Amino acid sequence: MSKSHPIETPATALHAGWMGVALGEARRALETGDVPIGAVVLGPDGGLLGVGRNEREAHGDPTAHAEMVAIREAAQRLGGWRLEGCTLVVTLEPCTMCAGAVLLARLPKVVFGAWDEKAGAAGSVFDVLRERRLNHWVEVFPGVRQNECAALLRDFFATHR
């Protein structure tokens, strides 16, 4: 974590467990040649509402980020777009598109693994999730199983560059 990152809330063991599920989804993205990023949405009761992995290559859809896929599935399962009381767990810091979707869905918590120093919007490049000029703010739990999440991405890009 760089010195420029704002103060965060400590993650819990429960977050680490759910990150394991997100990592499993990230590995599944490799099957279609997608960047290995995975996400899950947990309901207010802690139950699994949505899972997602990057599917941009699989579907030719630039918006098919892991977070977007998981958020869509959770909203469909709940029967509405408001994901109040839910938590997004994702292997990489959300980009601006995904951070915007988090805000629009009214997700109050985001847990992520690796920082994205090139495009992150939860404290590294931007801090969209905690922008005080917006009408919704998110509690952020960064760096959960960070080494595993970062290694998966490093290994992927080492073979694609």
Image (cartoon, rainbow, N blue to C red):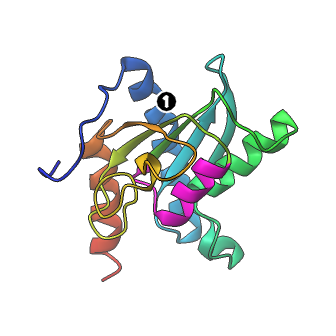
Disc 1: which residue: 18
Q: Residue at x 59, y 68 (%)?
A: 32
In this image, 11 relative to 51: left or right?
left
**Can residue 18 be seen in the rendering of this structure?**
yes
- Number of labels in the image equals 1
Amino acid type indicated by mark 1: Trp
Give the magenta-colored segment's residue range: 91-104
* 46, above or below 63, in the image: above
Helix, strand or loop at mark 1: helix
Q: Residue at x 40, y 43 (%)?
A: 112
Q: Residue at x 46, y 49 (%)?
A: 129
* 155, above or below 83, in the image: below
Of the 4 image quadrants, the one containing the C terminus is bottom left
Q: Tell which residue pokes out farthest to the left in this image.
A: 3
**Can residue 53 be seen in the rendering of this structure?**
no
- Does the segment drawn in magenta span residue 101? yes
Residue 91 locus on image (x, y percent): 42, 48
Where on the picture, by quarter, is residue 76? Answer: top right
In this image, 136 relative to 69: left or right?
left
- Taking depth in this image into account, of 125 and 90 the one nearest to the observer is 125
Q: Tell which residue pokes out farthest to the bottom in this image.
A: 161
Q: Residue at x 56, y 43 (%)?
A: 136
